[in-house]
Image (spheres, rainbow, N blue to C red):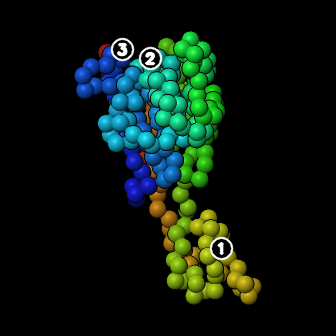
Amino acid sequence: MDFSRIDWRILGCSAAIPAPGQYPSAQSLRVGGTLMLIDCGEGTQIRIREVGLRGATFDVILISHLHGDHVFGLPGLMSSWTLQGRTKPLVVIGPSGLEAYLRGVNASTQGNWSYPVEFRVAEPGIVYQNDDVVVRSQALKHRIETWGYRIDEVVAPRKVCYDLAVAAGLEHADFRSLQLGRDAVTRGGRVVPNSEVTTEGRSGFSMAYLSDTSFVPELAGFARDVEFLYHESTYLERH
């Protein structure tokens, strides 16, 4: 697998109570030009600075649930972005109640955001997609509404062999269609079979983030064939 487009950092993975050197749940994931934050426990913005992401502009935030060790860092982080003069729009995805929680903190502290925020309530299926990623969510089984996320990199199924394509009379404008597995037609009207000028494309990055949950049968299908699985393991068999 080609990881040149991937930057994945575990910012925190401890249980509910923070300790020196141990932070609650938070991860950053960059896929191509898209930077995501997955959960935002207390101290996340400190960890963002420590790992060298200070000044990075996150595009999407995915929140699994509203327990404090997964969300207490978010109001402060979003406030800091305002202080830093952020203007880029932000997409925030999570359980019902997340928007009310964040707006409630703003109301109580007389705060505001200097940038547009689009809130989306998680639901089964695709909750976000662009040219880099497709993000899906799946309900987990916890004491409160909780969601898991699957992130798949968008990759072209075929790779164009440049020299062969040019020799066949094709132009750069034809390459996207070739990458998608289609045949191409030269300006002279000759059909060029896809298999003659392409090879199989690379596999894409995929991961599933399944936080606080007990057994859910649907998760096997939801996470099937992912390259990386990040899952609950605090209590193992004891609970």
Q: Position of residue 194 (x, y in %)?
A: 61, 75
Looking at the rendered structure, the kind of residue marked 1 is: Ala
Measuring 47% from the left and 49% from the top, which residue is drawn there? 31
Specify few, some or many for label 3: CA neighbours under 10 Å numbering under 14, 14-19, or 20 or more: few
Q: Mark 3 points at which residue?
A: 239
Left or right of residue 39, residue 110 in this image: right
Looking at the rendered structure, the kind of residue marked 2 is: Gly
Which of discs 3 and 1 lies nearer the camera? The answer is 1
Q: How far apart are marks 3 and 1 (CA)?
A: 58 Å
Specify few, some or many for label 2: CA neighbours under 10 Å numbering under 14, 14-19, or 20 or more: some
First-in-chain label (3 vs 1): 1
Query: Residue 68 bears which disc, if any?
Result: 2
Disc 2 element: helix
In this view of the protein, which residue sits in the foreground, 5 or 225?
Answer: 5
Q: Which residue lies furthest to the top in this view?
A: 108
Can residue 223 be spotted in the picture? Answer: no
Q: In which quarter of the image is residue 17?
A: top left
Q: How far apart are marks 2 and 1 (CA)?
A: 50 Å
Disc 1 element: helix
Query: Residue 27 bears which disc, if any?
Result: none
